[in-house]
Amino acid sequence: MSNLHPNELHNASKTRLDRIQGYLSEFVYGGIDGSVTTFAVVAGSTGANLDPSVIIILGFANLFADCFSMSVGNYLSTKSSLEQYEKQKKHELWEIENLPEVEKDEIREIYRAKGFEGELLDKIVDVITSDKERWLDVMMKEELEMVPEKKPPVKTAAVTFFSFIAIGFIPLITYVWEYLSGQSVGDPFLITSILTGVAFLIIGYLKAVVNKTSRLKGILWTLFLGGAAAVVAYYVGNVLEKLFR
């Protein structure tokens, strides 16, 4: 049994939930890319009448290649943001330590623009500049409009990788099942389309949650993009198959 007070348990659970939600955007965009690109490969291969074993090979090749590329891109982007923030922070700290009067005037102008004036403005400036860390934090946020990236690059890349693989595997499930079990499921592409459509519904809803937009709009837009990519890929594969047959 836990010795934690109910309020402490609630706060601990909320903290874990907030931490998970902090990575929801990486999960969503990894899932969208994974499902759309893999489904497009499957659709194009089906349009070209390729053998199911070839569809599996092409699907997995695309899945892991794109997943690696996107995860690395996510890692480098997050790492670059962290490095840029630290670089600007060091520069701002140097200015505070070596040009304090200039930086105080900048603080004054920032808060004067917010509508403060007179003794209240002087007091705000004195309070902020009395603590170097507070001063630096205000300058970073108010002057440079920069906030630190709190999510480690390795974790954001890992979430992207997991989401891309997990959601991107859905368009291949039917073909892998047929291959491993040796049992036909009827029209594998139809079943794949239905399963992928459900994935689009879920990921579209989560995307709307992340962007704080209409849930219905998020779902329909994701369905449209995924479906459009699949239709284009299907007919490109079909046309090419006829040309090179």
Image: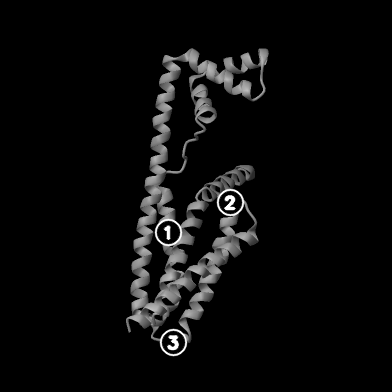
C-alpha separation, residue under disc 2 versus residue under disc 1: 21 Å
Which is nearer the eye, 24 or 239? 239
Give residue 166's position: percent from left, percent from top: 44, 64
C-alpha separation, residue under disc 3 versus residue under disc 1: 29 Å
Report the residue at 54% width, 50% height from top.
Answer: 21
Q: Which of marks 2 and 1 is in front?
A: 2
Residue linked to disc 2:
211
Residue linked to disc 1:
162
Report the residue at 55% width, 28% height from top.
Answer: 142
Q: Are marks 3 and 1 in contact (CB under 8 Å)?
A: no
Can you tell which mark lies on residue 184?
3
Q: For the residue marked with disc 1, what is the amino acid?
A: Phe
**Above or below, comparing residue 171 to residue 88 in the picture:** below
Dot 1: element:
helix
Q: Do the residues labelled 2 and 3 touch (CB within 8 Å)?
A: no
Q: For the residue marked with disc 2, what is the amino acid?
A: Asn
Res 84 visible: yes
